[in-house]
Amino acid sequence: MRPILRAEGLSKAFGRLLAVSGVNLEVAAGSIHAIIGPNGAGKSTLFDLLSGAKRPDRGRVYFLDKEITHIAVEERIRLGLSRTFQVPQVFTNLTARENLIIALEAAHSLSSYPWPRKSRFLEEEASALLERLGLEEQASRLVGELAHGDQRLVEIGLALCLRPKLLLLDEPTAGMSDAETWRTVQTLKSLHREEGLTLLFIEHDMAVVFGIADRVTVLHLGEVLAEGTPDEIAKDEKVQAAYLGEEVMAG
Ligand SMILES: Nc1ncnc2c1ncn2[C@@H]1O[C@H](COP(=O)(O)OP(=O)(O)O)[C@@H](O)[C@H]1O
Ligand SMILES: [Mg+2]
């Protein structure tokens, strides 16, 4: 299938450390694609290069066949490429609903609308999103007081306000309980199924990877070590060797 995102020969060094090295990546439109790899493999740095938070030293990035290597984060978002972070970026002193309303207002640039109409529109959109994320009961609580998993879901909600075609998620289930992880996986699955959203996500929980990914790329020491279906990756000896000493491939 035609790739929605393509990276060619991406490299990024921090001083003498080559964090990302000659990475080629193709994400098929409509897929759920996981990036895995041991700590320090370069996964988050790769996301920074794809989302525009950092510029590569070498290589190119294409989104929907348009080269985006040097365009700003905001412009990438406008084209339909959004991301979430390893540490959720949310307004902790506002409620879940207020977080979404701010993002929706910004996303729709409604500043010239008459307030009553705008307000009703935003409230309805926010309610729909809260329902979609399973956050109805948390809607009026301060995000800083929510469970970690719910904060992550609010952050996913903020990204969804921008109506992305491709959503990059950096460890969406990190620090979640089993119940929160399961809920997040169900939410991501339904977004993929019902909204046709393509997902590229970094994940350390192999049960999540094998549960939802149709494609897996393994990074190791900044390079692509292997790429394939979850089954191919699970059997790959290079991958097993890279994870030696880590528990992640167990189970
Ligand atoms: N801003 C930075 N300055 C210096 N080194 C960094 C920076 N960001 C990441 N690194 C280093 O780059 C390597 C890859 O980091 P990262 O992309 O965060 O890996 P991962 O997300 O796979 O754990 C690590 O060795 C990390 O210490
Ligand atoms: Mg990381």
Image (tube, rainbow, N blue to C red):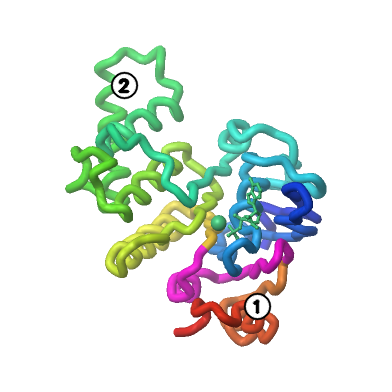
Residue 213 included in the magenta stretch of the image: yes
Tag 1 secondary structure:
helix
Q: In this view, does 185 lie to the left or right of 117?
A: right
Q: Give above or below for 166 relative to 23.
A: above
Left or right? Give the position of 220 relative to 8: left
- Mark 2 and mark 1 residues within 8 Å of each other at the beta carbon: no
- Amino acid carrying mark 2 in the image: Lys
Span highlighted in magenta in the image: 203-223
Residue in front for this viewpoint, 27 or 221: 221
Q: Mark 1 points at which residue?
A: 242
Amino acid type of the residue that numbered disc 1 sits on in the rendered structure: Ala
Is residue 102 left or right of 197 when viewed as pictured? left
Lower position in the chain sequence, tag 2 or tag 1 = 2
Q: How crowded is mark 2: few (under 14 residues within 10 Å), some or many (20 or more)?
A: some
Residue at the (58%, 43%) spot, across then down: 81
Residue at 77%, 58% (x, y): give it. 21
